Amino acid sequence: MSYKVKLEVFEGPLDLLLYLIKKEELDIYDIPVAKITDQYLEYLELMQLLDLGIAGEFLVMAATLIHIKSKMLLPPDQVEGDDKEEADPRAELVRRLLEYKKFKEAAVELHQMESQHKHFFARVGVTVPETKTPAPDEYFEASLFDLITAFTKVLKDIPREVFHQVVKDEFTVSEKIHDILHFFVDRQSMFFADLFKKARNKIELITIFLALLELIRLKEVVVVQSATFADIEIIKNAEAIKPADGAAQSQ
Amino acid sequence: MERDEIKRIIEALLFVSDKPVSADTLQDVIKGVESTEVRVIVEELNGEYASSGRAFRIKEIAGGFQMMTDPVYSQWISALYKRPADKLTGPALETLAIIAYKQPITRSDMEAIRGVNVDGVLHTLEERMLIKTRGRLEAPGRPILYGTTTDFLKHFGLKSLEELPKLKEFQESDLDFVREEKTRQVIDKETGKLHETTIPDMITEGTKDDNRETAPQS
């Protein structure tokens, strides 16, 4: 199965948490709070670094997670004469996650029904405008989070450099776009990790990543994954690649 | 009117109609048939189509009947009619699911479930005529209530809202887990560090709480 990445309306903190739970194979009924809080914050940091406009809800959730974590560290209140033990501080969050998950699953079923029903045709009333449809192959939306996951790996792999010299090393996004397109002149595809092989520092990595996002937005390339959490491949979008100097203006 | 004649009239009407026709409408138009009988006649027609290998059947959808082609021919039809690809995105489907199951529902209740702002998605869904406003809630602010439309049923091939798949309900009792009292270490007087050794499970691995009922597989 291949699917394309669609970068669009950012989903929310509950989405991210469910994604993390799935990815790390955590038990939703028994969430390891410290672990998930760390990962959540790591993601937020990366999103901020990439200037991806974090909505307030993400920050509220960060605070909530930290609050839960701290509550779990403290002894429960011993109320005089009250035999009831204190509720698990995670309970409310888990309830919200389960509630949301319910509808996420319902949405998947609806999607399947939609796909099946698309094959039934009835008499057409209004004249259907003849629009050229984009390639109708099955695509599964991988979220922006998958790209970020892959990018996190790349970031971790870069050797820690000691900066002993302040060099004004400015990489612009348009330069990197140019580089990537140049790479695709005689190639059809490349792996995500290969894109970053020559980068020397964090800033360069980020610039390359932004260049990739821009190219995806411009539909110059598409990004696919053969299975969940598999390696990401970048493929040239055959119609759109222009000769080298054409892309330089896109900054 | 002869029953056979009524059958053919129904067939003609459904052949022509570009939207589902309800049994009641057929009764009004033909005047010689009860709406209950309509379903029987439709089944007879479908029987005829099946035995003569026709490329279409009469389907029941969105509260009415409509002739629809057999799905095996969809690629041919798509070659003839270039229909714009109008599949819905993830967030749109999720919001739509919430509205479908909980209608009528306000925007803020939707947002409480999804954890994000739904304005953009609501706009898209309204434009596609899959949802509509259904009055206002009698509460402070009188917020607008939303519900799904007939087009929603048509889009997903549903006869009615009853045909929506059942939600996978989790048990409220699953959330009744309670934290055990674990002995706590406080700040180590020598190192000034907080000992976490007595509470590691709870924080990094979750509680291994025996009081809790077994959770179903998620």
Image (cartoon, helix red, strand yellow):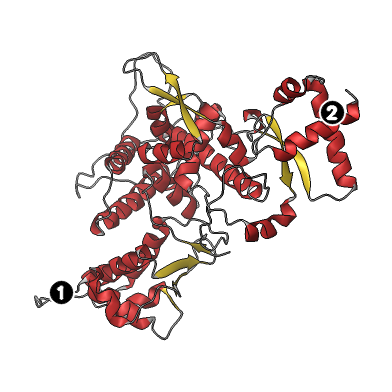
Residue at mark 1 shares a chain with residue at mark 2: no
The quarter of the rendered structure image containing the N terminus of chain A is bottom right
Q: Residue at x 69, y 60 (%)?
A: B76
Image-based side of A128 in relation to A6, left or right: right
- Please tell me how crowded label 1 is: few (under 14), some (14-19), or many (20+) other residues with Cα within 10 Å: few
* SS at badge 1: loop
Q: Amino acid at mark 2?
A: Ile
In this view, A194 is above or below B191 = below
Displayed quadrant of residue A42: bottom left
Residue B94 pos. (x, y %) = 49, 40
Name the foreground residue: B80 vs A92.
B80
- Residue A238 appears left or right of A227: left
Closer to us: B108 or B56: B56
Q: Amino acid at mark 1?
A: Glu
Q: Point out which mark residue B6 bears.
A: 2
Looking at the image, residue A177 sits to the left or right of residue A239; the answer is left
Q: For the residues marked 1 and 2, what is the alpha-carbon distance in whole angstroms?
A: 80 Å
Question: x, y percentage for residue B79?
Answer: 64, 61
Residue B140 at x, y percent in the picture: 32, 15
Q: Residue at x 89, y 48 (%)?
A: B52
Q: Write down the residue under mark 1.
A: A170
As helix, strand or loop, the secondary structure at mark 2 comes to helix
Callout 1: residue from which chain? A
Q: Is residue B182 visible?
A: yes
Residue A106 on image: x %, y %: 56, 39
Image point (26%, 59%), residue name: A50
Q: Nearer the viewer, residue B106 or B148?
A: B148
Viewer-nearest of labels 1 and 2? 2
Q: Is residue B28 above or below residue A30?
A: above
Q: Nearer the viewer, residue B122 or B38?
A: B38
Q: Residues within 10 Å of mark 2 (few under 14, many from 20)?
A: some
Chain under numbered label 2: B
